[in-house]
Amino acid sequence: MSNRYRKNLLVCNGSSCQQASDADLVAFINFKLKEYNLEDGIKVVQSVCSNKCSIGPNIIVYPDNVEYSKVTKSDIDDIIIEHLLNERIVERLVFDKENGNGVAPIKQYRIALRNCGFIDPEEIKDYIEKDGYDALAKCLSKYTPEEVTQEVIKSGLRGRGGGGFPTGLKWEITSKSVSDQKYVVCNADEGDPGAFMDRSVLEGDPHSVLEAMAICGYCIGANKGIIYVRAEYPLAVKRLKIAINQAKEYGLLGKNIFGTGFEFTITIKYGAGAFICGEETALIHSMEGFLGEPTLKPPFPSVSGYLKKPTNVNNVETFANIPAIINKGADWYASIGTEKSKGTKVFALAGKINNVGLIEVPMGITLREIIYDIGGGIVNGKKFKAVQTGGPSGGCLTEKHLDLPIDFDSLTAAGSMMGSGGMIVMDEDDCMVSMARFYLEFIVEESCGKCAPCRIGNKRLHEMLTKLCDGKGTMEDLDLLRNLSVVVKDTSLCGLGQTSPNPILSTMANFYDEYYAHVAEHRCPSGQCKSFMLYYISEENCIGCLVCARKCPVGAISGEKKKLHIINQELCTKCGVCMEKCKFHAVHLN
Amino acid sequence: MWSLYGKMQVSCSSLKLILYYNFMDTISIKIDNKNFQVEKGTTILDAAKSVGINIPTLCYMHLHDLNTTHNPTGCRICVVEVVGRKNLALACATECLPGMEIKNQTIRVLNSRKTILELILSDHPTDCLICAKNGDCDLQSMAQQMGIREIHYKGEQSHYIKDTSPAIKRDMDKCIGCRRCLTMCNDVQTVGALSAINRGFMSVVAPAFQMNLEDSVCTYCGQCVAVCPTAALTEVDHTNLVIRALADPTKTVVVQTAPAVRVALGEEFGYEPGTIVTGKMTAALKDMGFDYVFDTDFAADLTIMEEATELLDRLTRYINGDTTVKLPLLTSCCPACVNFFEHQFPEMKDIPSTARSPQQMFGAIAKTYFADKLGIKRENMVVVSIMPCLAKKYECSRDEFKTNGNPDVDYVLSTRELSRLIKQASIDFDSLIPLEFDHPMGESSGAGVIFGTTGGVIEAAVRTAYETFTKQKLDKVDFKQLRGMDWIRESTIDFNGTPIKIGIAHGLGNARKLLQEIREGKSQYHAIEIMACPGGCIGGGGQPLHHGDSNILLARQKALYAADKAKVIRKSHENPSIQKLYTEFLERPMSEKAHQLLHTHYFDRSTHVEITKD
Amino acid sequence: METIKSVADLHKIRTSILEAKQKQIVENDNKKLVEIKVAMATCGIASGAKAVMDFFREELPKRNIVANVKQTGCMGYCYAEPTLEITIQDEKPVVFGYVDLKKADEIIEKFIKKGELVDGIIPIKYELAN
């Protein structure tokens, strides 16, 4: 096994780097290598995005692991002469110096995802090898439940499902509820559009969740754990089942765990995919076999939850952090993140971003770092417009928020929310009114229908937004829209309704001009709303060939041979076929 | 001196009590900048009410004596501002905390309430003028109270298939999602016919799988109808059919009026609850053209004759060591109870008495004995019942109560429908001169009258059974131990040395408890009376709406006992018309003829839905 | 069946896992051990990771390469699925994205056999907590 190449040049093949480049770098470097007679010892390899798109094009020299950024054609000679021939780093092309040696800065830090993608989730030995079940062993053999709870409190971990309630405090409250039976519930009813953090953890590292649930059970005095998981996650369910069985076989679940007398069992309950069942009271009702509808808190589940017994409900990601906290200590965990939001957060990047994917970053990272460094920038080099965080309950953050350090409180202050970690990026082509309408459509679909403001209010909000997108809105509608949004937010029963108008309120706050344009100027600034499009046939170019009339799927074009054709705007569905088919460029779009 | 000392001691301790009470159990809160002392543990709604501030509510319902508070926190009309809280708080479900500052009159609160009400109205038909609940609708009065003049939010309205069962009509377009019906059906009555199904804008209260009410386990007790704030749930209206029958010269229209009607009908005409309006009611019915105005109480006496005989028969056999005999005997007058055990306790269908209900006995006798007397065919006789009940509408449509397709009872009007009919006929109820019932089926004993309240049927049965069993005269006919409003009552009556254990339950939820005890063999009753509606027929689903005010029920109950007391004849078997009926027609209780006309049998209506598990 | 009855048992199992690996290396004539992890979360499987994993499992023995091919969860590179990570003993792991069967073949022939990098490398950009 001998590598005939001394060094490799890893040229980023990401679209952002390609766009930023002044040439086909790969071809150019190969040409240059030939010039220097180096083609036998050096190989150019195209790499997948290296996550530093803002300073692309990037080239990594392997195995030295030196990364050069903003590389142009004129820099290649330097790299070859200095680095490849003389082993000297070209300092001027090294952009990130804090880590020394030009090694790329590390933006991601994986705590919850520490095993995801590294271990075989269906093999408990893999997990054990990676210090698995050490945390549980440590808790049971060395600490009292109070001590463990205090450790979790000290770590500053806050609920990752969206609410951000201090996890340790929740455990403490549940532990103080007196009852003959208590429950630990893992909320795996992930429902935000575009979010897949929990699914990834369950599919990649189910044991960490089981271990954390047992630790939680030890702290609060529960011997039963239940995982409420969406039935639409068959692979997660399969791997969870395997993990539970393996843990049972090894005696890591069941009676007398580690010979300490502690008993803990875990069962799975399936959710039918109702978004509202992510709300903890609705989730509990669903588990009990009742309609998945929220009820007023108090009583909180920590006092009266599943089967009216004290129940501690935590999200998958929250649990996944616990073993690491126990193993490495609360101080370590608390050293990561911002003052009030400790640790890391997993985000699911989606939308108009190059590197769609799952990332885990320390709290306090800026949006710019996420979008441009990790996310690889906006698809096709378009202009960033906004990012929706917190799913349909969140709000949009705009350009002015790009340098905002992200944590629970800063996002709320900016009119959005952390939510469970969905991040949908929008570019200049996205219409913010349409975007708000999309989220309201989701909410209308997912509202449970119990309280009037959410049941009818969101429906009316959606109808009003549709009216705006259809070009039929009035200025009065904008006032009504705002008023209704405020009332729905102020009066709804649960978190779903209390946050559902956020997409409207935040887009109205940040992009009022777009709303105004839809109503007063009868146009959609981003050109996304079809109803504002107007196809027409110009007199100069139309030769009366009848092609467009024949191709129109709805028969909206009339005209005789060799005479000007006319589009009936009432019938036109703005499909654009006429424009596409006309060879004479007679069809125009305004 | 001693006595004075004693008094002082009492007053001292009560003073201490008051001080203690003040110190521990009241808290001070502020509503709209005024300070109030309110009881600890109360909701903002109750606290405000106690100091004269009526916060508007829509879905909230408090049934004091049912011990049921329905606050699903769904309508959100009762929102108030609590200083320091981010969102508005619900008055009906937020407990007052010491020092709480509540604002009930801010623009934020008023705008929210109005907006929410407009939203509800935007999904509600605005056909108030021709609505069955026009003038008696909570939503209508709320819109009036809030001064709604325009519905700013317009859009799609939800539409559902209208479902008409023999007794109850469901028009879910008019449902506002208050879910009071759910509380009645599931929590109070434990019938479980209704549940909330679907999500979001399409969420609706319906039987499982959106089946028709008729196919569900609904008992037609009508308690859902009684609490529905709008016309989403209403009774099936028979008034027009009755008007048509009255106008048909070929028909002889006979009407019977149930005992509970006479003590409640007055409420619809502004009389105090518990006013007995028997005579005025009879006069009104006569005015409207009913040919014969009779009394269901007559049939109640007849029921006792059959039921008491059946009870004694079973008792005697039991005492003589017959192990096959089924005890306890369950009264069978309440059609909702019959539906209830046919659906939910089918294995116990041989326990109830086979005696038909008074309504059906009346119909059977009217269309045979009385029709013969008049010399008319049964087809030309129309029997109308005035009932406090909606299940009676279903009962009269049962096949076993028909002869060649002709029902023994043709139409059933609820008390509410009767009041509407009287109003339609332009009758001034106030100025009516009371009239007596017609003969022969208008004569009744006091025992028949008390059928209308919980405990009444069994008391009536005991009065007759005692004398038949012991062959001794019963002097004290008031069995106080069987009366009252407690949900489940039990008592042992001494039948001259033989203790007879009696159980009573009203409200189907309580009936379920009692039936379960019997099923599990835990109870040793000889006879049991169950009534589906809280309070018995006086609280029936067809009565004037009592809005959860149990004082109204108590007044109606008191009136029935007063009417019983006013009767000269207090025992069913002493009713001369009944005695005459037996000598002329039926021979004796439980005779073959009696069996044919006055008894029935029950069916297993339970449906088993099998859910396969993986 | 090993069961864990005490904390010591847990450590014992961990030691035995490491020993088993060592044993495998020895049995393999002390050749460098190759470990291939295929990201087999829902997203990976949907993009064809299963076929790639099966390919490695079938082809490697045929080409006389001893390797541990195993599935793992999401690596986070949704945009580059199917992804896999190859660790040649004593060397840093290398992650490849957009691995189809053709690329898999290239990886075996060039990277595994000769240690030569091929197109489609994903530079690792995170730090791990363990």
Image (tube, coloured by chain):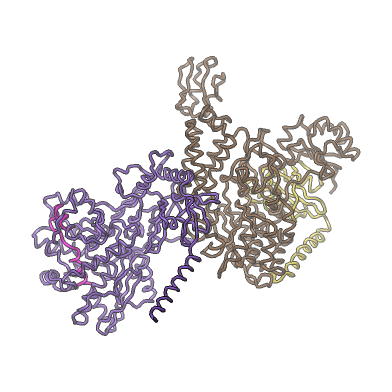
Chain colours: A brown, B purple, C yellow
**Residue located 22% across and 75% down the image:** B477
Query: Is A495 placed above or below A574 here?
Result: below
Q: Quadrant of the N terminus of chain B?
A: bottom left
Q: Would you say C112 lies left or right of A342 here?
A: right
Indicate the quadrant where residue A167 lies. bottom right
State the residue lying farthest toward the right.
A86
**Relative to A318, does residue B523 appear above or below in the rendering?**
below
- Was residue A377 drawn as part of the magenta stretch in this picture? no
Residue with the most extreme front position? B1
B295 magenta-colored: yes
Q: Residue at x 74, y 70 (%)?
A: C8
Read off the magenta span: B281-307
| Residue B432, quarter of the rendered image | bottom left
Asked if residue B349 can be seen in this view, the reply is: no
Relative to the observer, which residue lies in front, C10 or C20? C10
Q: Position of residue B403 (x, y in %)?
A: 19, 60
| Of A86 and A381, the residue lying toward us | A381
Image height of A356 relative to B307, above or below: above
- Is residue A481 shown to the viewer in this render? yes
> In which image quadrant can residue A349 be found?
top right
Q: In the visual, does A515 lie left or right of A13?
A: left
Q: Position of residue A521 (x, y in %)?
A: 53, 27
